[in-house]
Image (tube, grey):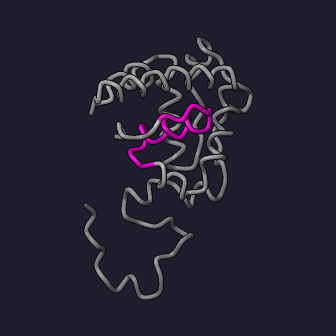
Amino acid sequence: MGNDTPTHPDPKGIFTDISVELTGFDRAELGGTGMVDTYYDTLLRMIGEREAGQLFRYAQEALDADRKEQRKDNAAFKKAVIDNPRFGPVALGLIKLWYLGRWYPLSAAYRDRFGSTADDVEHVVSGQGYREGLVWAAAGAHPMGAKPPGFGSWAEPPSPTP
């Protein structure tokens, strides 16, 4: 994960830094999907701007601490976001969103404790989200029905994934 990523104090930059940590893809790869703005807006709609602001604050402090201590394991980020009962479920939702292009609602227990918005329902964010899902790059595949690999590509064995 990205200990060498620069600090980005604006909310969308922090969102991107969080996404880098959660997905294992770098800023350029995430930006190349064209989904940063859409997923940022989706997160704000799902949990509300106030809660998103809290997530961004905790995550930024943790990322800064990990960078300062030059931690390779990102222990502060893991503790502040992933293992945190308030932000962990949201982090899991973001991972699913980036990989699958689909938002899955937060659990009823989460909503009862921390709240959510009326928009927090299962839905495909956009057709582009499906096509640009990180699952395809991670699997070394292409989305079915979109972005075909090219004529005759089936005639060659798949290239090995590193």
Q: Position of residue 64 (x, y in %)?
A: 42, 26
- In this rendering, the answer to whether 27 lies above or below 40 is below
Q: Residue at x 51, y 67 (%)?
A: 144
Q: Is residue 27 magenta?
A: no
At 31% across and 83% down in the image, what residue appears?
156
The one nearer the camera, 46 or 66, is 66
Front in this rendered view, residue 135 or 33: 33
Rendered residue at 61%/18% (across/down):
111
Q: Please provide percent x and percent y for residue 107.
A: 56, 24
- Which contiguous range is marked in magenta? 7-26
Q: Would you say the magenta stretch is mainly helix, strand or loop?
A: helix
Give the quarter of the figure containing the N terminus.
top left
Q: Residue 159, how many percent across, how many down?
A: 28, 73
Rendered image quadrant of residue 147: bottom right
Give how far across and how far down residue 24 sits, in percent. 38, 45
**For residue 16, side relative to residue 79 (left or right):** right
User: Is residue 140 shown left or right of residue 57?
Assistant: left
Nearer-the-camera pick, 122 or 23: 23
Q: Is residue 18 magenta?
A: yes
Write down the quadrant of residue 114 in the picture.
top right
